[in-house]
Amino acid sequence: MVYKRSMAWLILRAVLVPCACLPTGHAQAAPADQVQDVALTTTEGWIGRALMLRGFPAGDDLKYDAAGSLQSAGKTTDGTLAGFDLQKVSRRGDGELQLEGVRVAIRYNPEQHIFERHLLKLETMKLRLATAAAQPVQQSLAAIFSVGIDPALQRSMPLYWSHYFIPSLAWQADNVTGQPIVGLDTRTAVGLVYPVAARKVEPQATVEATQDHVRGTVQVRLDVDAQGLPQRIVVRQPLGYGLDAKTVDAVERYRFQPGSKDGAPAVFEFLVNQSFQ
């Protein structure tokens, strides 16, 4: 009986007396490196995704704060050269992650009508991302990357790209606002004198396209105003590798002998096919 009473007392005492290692009223704080592990593991989950760098930075060593804002200002590049293949994530000191990978070029496949990703083996990159307990790293990554060419990325692109992805996007007021435009489907009408390119500019291929032996044709659509100036340039058939941007830059410097309709100056829709061989 003494044995049984002693055991009962020990059991009761164990229930009533709190453990000295877990003080009542206080939660045990997780170690700082354990919080860092959450950020590290979350970021590793982005490996293998079709990432695009928002803002299209051109550098190969980029630094971001905990909100995902780029801290090292520099040159930008075309959206088709702003892909990123994340391959490794590691810590870099306290409160900072290092993301390592390879820059990716986007190339358009005209047969399948899709954008394909091509790793640029010479374009290794490092991204440094600050981490903070108050800022979920998932939000930071979403501010740095889009997964594919998402709508927000489309709207941030130059007009020749944003109108490609969003054809219904309204144009800002310009020299052809409110004027009738002779469309491509009315070229057989009588009384029309079509514009002729009086000055052409040949674009240079990008270094990335030259290294990867990219060949093909970029087609852009534009309006030629009554003064013979190109307006509202839009990529119609892309090629990628930065060649679309090079084509648009060149066409912006075209000058035309203006067209006319029934003897009066008119605005004409026009196509330019730029071949890269």
Image (cartoon, rainbow, N blue to C red):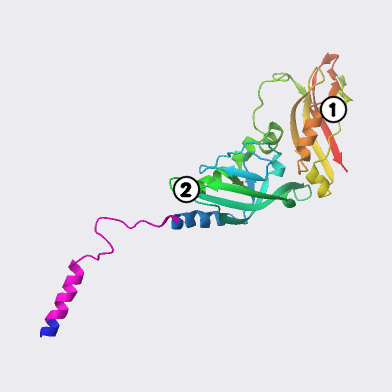
Asked which quadrant contains residue 8, the reply is bottom left
Which residue is found at the position 25% from the left and 60% from the top?
Answer: 23
Name the disc covering residue 136, or none: 2
The location of residue 88, given as percent across then percent down, is: 61, 57
Q: Nearer the viewer, residue 191 or 165?
A: 165
On screen, residue 197 above or below 104: above
The location of residue 63, given as percent across then percent down, is: 59, 43
Tell me which segment is drawn in magenta.
5-32
Q: Element under label 1?
A: loop
Q: Quadrant of the C terminus?
A: top right
Name the disc covering residue 97, or none: none
Which residue is found at the position 16% from the left and 72% from the top?
Answer: 12
Q: Quadrant of the N terminus?
A: bottom left
Residue 27 magenta-drawn? yes
The residue labelled by disc 1 is: 187
Which residue is found at the position 75% from the left and 47% from the top?
Answer: 107
Can residue 148 be spotted in the picture?
no
The amino acid pointed to by label 1 is Arg
The location of residue 96, given as percent across then percent down, is: 53, 49
The location of residue 243, given as percent across then percent down, is: 79, 40
Q: Nearer the viewer, residue 238 or 142?
A: 142
